[in-house]
Each structure stands twice: as structure tokens, then as C-alpha cells.
Image: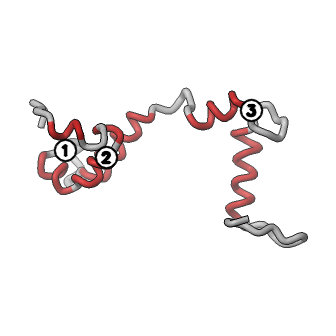
Amino acid sequence: ADMFANEEGGPEPDWVVTEREQFADFRDLNKDGKMDKDEIQHWILPQDYDHALAEARHLVYESDADKDQKLTKEEVLDNWNMFVGSQATNYGEDLTRNHDEL
């Protein structure tokens, strides 16, 4: 009700329609109208999605100013807040250790 107050006979916002479609097509795998434990696990931790790789690609994409697919020390320092807030760097802890590759 905080995001959408459904008025009887009123139209649903596009995002509600999209969410209903996502639920029906991808979340409710056994088509019973609700999500069970296995469906929730698949949604939160999909087996075909590598979270670490996705986060690493995101950090490189956002920080690689010259788009050479390599990060320099300057590029990392220019985007330090993104790295400190990233799970991929243990929330910045890994940045304080000596690394030969940097």
C-alpha cells in the first residue's frame, strides 16, 4: 500500500504489470501462484549467475576511465568510494593490503 494503493477498477502502474509478468514467467517456477522455499532460493541465489564476476565487471566498467579493461592505481583511487563500498573488495579491506598487481 505504501508503493501502490490499488483502487478498485483503476489501472495498475506499468511497474506493477511488469512485476506480475516477472513473477509469472520467472519466479513462480511451479505455477502455483506463490513462491516456495526453493523458488525464493533460486531468485536470491540463482545458480547461473556469478555475483563476484558481475561485481568485478561493474567495478571495472565504472572505474576504467580510458576503457582499456585495466585499472590503474589512479583509476582505483579516483573511484575509491565505489571500491570501499564493494563486497568484491571486502568493503575496502583488501585495498589496504600489499598487491603486486597494483
* Neighbourhood count class around disc 2 (C-alpha, 10 Å): few under 14, some 14–19, many 20 upward: some
Q: Are marks 1 and 2 in contact (CB under 8 Å)?
A: yes
Q: Residue at x 45, y 31 (%)?
A: 50
Q: Residue at x 62, y 31 (%)?
A: 41
The amino acid sitting under disc 3 is: Asp
Find disc 3 in the rendering and name its residue: 36
Q: Earlier in the sequence, mark 1 or mark 2?
A: 2
Up the image or down, 2 lies above or below 63; here it is below
- Which secondary structure, mark 2? helix
- x then y, percent, for residue 49: 50, 32
Find disc 2 in the rendering and name its residue: 59
Up the image or down, 60 lies above or below 35; here it is below
- x then y, percent, for residue 65: 22, 55
Q: Earlier in the sequence, mark 1 or mark 3?
A: 3
The dot on residue 71 is 1
26 left or right of 94 in image: right
2 left or right of 8 in image: left
Q: Residue at x 74, y 42 (%)?
A: 25
CA gap, disc 2 and disc 3: 34 Å
Quarter of the figure that contains the N terminus: bottom right
Q: Quadrant of residue 14?
A: bottom right
